[in-house]
Amino acid sequence: MRIVITPQELEFFRSELTDHPAILDALRVIEDCDGDLEDAAISLAIRAGQEPDTNERWIEGLAKRWRHVLCQAEIRESLEDGLSGAVVNAIVTHTELPSSLATPVAIYVLKTGVQPFCQPLEEKI
């Protein structure tokens, strides 16, 4: 599933996150990739010293790897409210992800839907 962030969405995120330079940098990379979240996440991962092993569905795999954290009540509730500096900071605090990667992961969860993303975890409990 290809996720594209529209120029309007990018502008909205920027207007809401003016005090978060790392998030703004990630948004610039997303914009440079014509809004393609997958391409941007791979670019940001390479910048962060990671070596993505695939070009397709890499962001999905990264998000799923941290699903147990992203779906904890505190972070999940923050995600349900939308992208914010607080949610990116919470993801960074509870995972090994830098802000540059926490941003596209949070956007991925938002765009696919927090409830559907967390549902497989809830079914196991």
Image: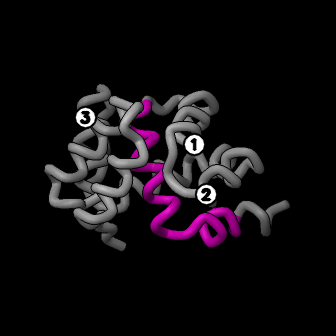
Point out residue 103 in the picture as x, y percentages from the top left corner.
42, 44
Residue that numbered label 2 is attached to: 81
Density class for disc 3 (Cα within 10 Å; few <14, some 14-19, many ≥20) is few
Residue type pointed to by label 3: Ile
Q: CA distance from mark 1 to mark 2?
A: 9 Å
Q: Residue at x 36, y 73 (%)?
A: 1
Left or right of 32 in this view: 63: right
Q: Residue at x 64, y 50 (%)?
A: 78
Residue type pointed to by label 1: Val
Residue that numbered label 1 is attached to: 87
Q: CA distance from mark 1 to mark 3?
A: 23 Å
Counting residues from the N terminus, which is met first, the one under dot 1 or under dot 3?
3
Q: Which segment did they paint magenta?
A: 99-120
Residue type pointed to by label 2: Asp
Looking at the image, how many numbered discs can be counted on the residues? 3
Whether residue 81 is situated above or below residue 99 in the rendered picture: below
Density class for disc 2 (Cα within 10 Å; few <14, some 14-19, many ≥20) is few
Q: Residue at x 68, y 53 (%)?
A: 76
Q: CA distance from mark 2 to mark 3?
A: 29 Å
Left or right of 30 in this view: 94: right
Residue that numbered label 3 is attached to: 46
| Callout in the foreground (2, 3) | 2
Assess whether residue 115 is covered by the magenta stretch.
yes
Tags 2 and 3 touching, CB below 8 Å: no
Left or right of 81 in this view: 40: left
Q: Secondary structure at mark 1?
A: helix
Q: Nearer the viewer, residue 21 or 106?
A: 21
Point out residue 37 in the picture as x, y percentages from the top left corner.
30, 57
Counting residues from the N terminus, which is met first, the one under dot 1 or under dot 2?
2
| Callout in the foreground (1, 2) | 2
